[in-house]
Amino acid sequence: MLRSASARVLDEDDELAVRELLATDPVAACMVAGRVEVHGTGAALGAPLWGLYSGRQLDAVCLAGANLIPFARPGTELAAAVAFAERARRTGRRCSTVVGPAAAVGPLWELLAPSWGPAREVRARQPLMAIEGPPAVPAEPRVRPVRRDQLDVLLPAAVAMFTEEVGASPLRVDGGAGYRARVAELVRSGLALAWIEDGQVLFKADIGAVSREACQLQGVWVAPQWRGRGIGQRGTAAVVEYARTAIAPVVSLYVNDYNGAARAAYTRVGFTQVGTFASILF
């Protein structure tokens, strides 16, 4: 059996070490870094943050919330996986997804699969793409932050996007109340953008994770009847322009490796691959 130092729950005293670790790759660490910047590393974070030290250096962290998100220094991923898997087995699965850099997610899932599996889907290689600077295609001017009074117009498109991307409807849990609250919070925060015409959503995207250094686009979707017309590229360009001027200087996203059309479209917008993510869906 593999042996490793034990992971522990981090607290306020670890915040500097956590920030220094996450700063080693702001794009890959965006989902965790944004939470830490807002809430710190104590109880206000809302979920346990596990950490693995070697001596005085923090090598890896794992946010154990609705998503299990590991992040590790290069070369420490296996030791981190052993330590985090031990804690995860002990607490039991409470997440809907394991997601993060593939080098950290892969070995962690290999250790968790016997007790947590089978997964509904394993997406082992998802290119992590980023853009810094203006997009390479014209932005669609009709893509704007969604107003609060447009929530009920946006919601069916958000549900369609989620179902298409994840393979299961978000309405299956609590009748969709939690998902509606999540979408409403994105709207309230100015992080949901859409092109809405005559009460219908043609294009939508969310800025789902935000840190000072980077933000991450999620939920990019074009209405089926409008696909193949370049709307996705122009819409994404509009979101990039909004995000890099109003949110963070680097805009990122991750995409399924088998989705060649989406990868090509993001490349035309100006995104380049800067890493690889992986997602385990339950």
Image (spheres, rainbow, N blue to C red):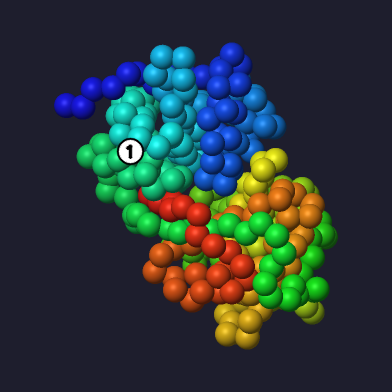
**Image position of 221 (left or right of 138):** left
Nearer to me, 229 or 89? 229
Q: Residue 222 sits in which quadrant?
A: bottom right
Q: Is residue 24 above or below residue 250?
A: above
Look at label 1 and name its amino acid. Answer: Leu
Q: Residue at x 67, y 32 (%)?
A: 37
Q: Position of residue 80 (x, y in %)?
A: 36, 30
- Residue 126 shows in this picture: yes
Nearer to me, 162 or 261? 261
Q: Is residue 230 above or below residue 21?
A: below
**Image position of 136 (left or right of 176):** right
Residue at which label 1 appears: 108
Q: Residue 151 sits in which quadrant?
A: bottom right
Q: Residue at x 38, y 57 (%)?
A: 125
Q: Position of residue 249 (x, y in %)?
A: 71, 50
Give the total of numbered labels: 1
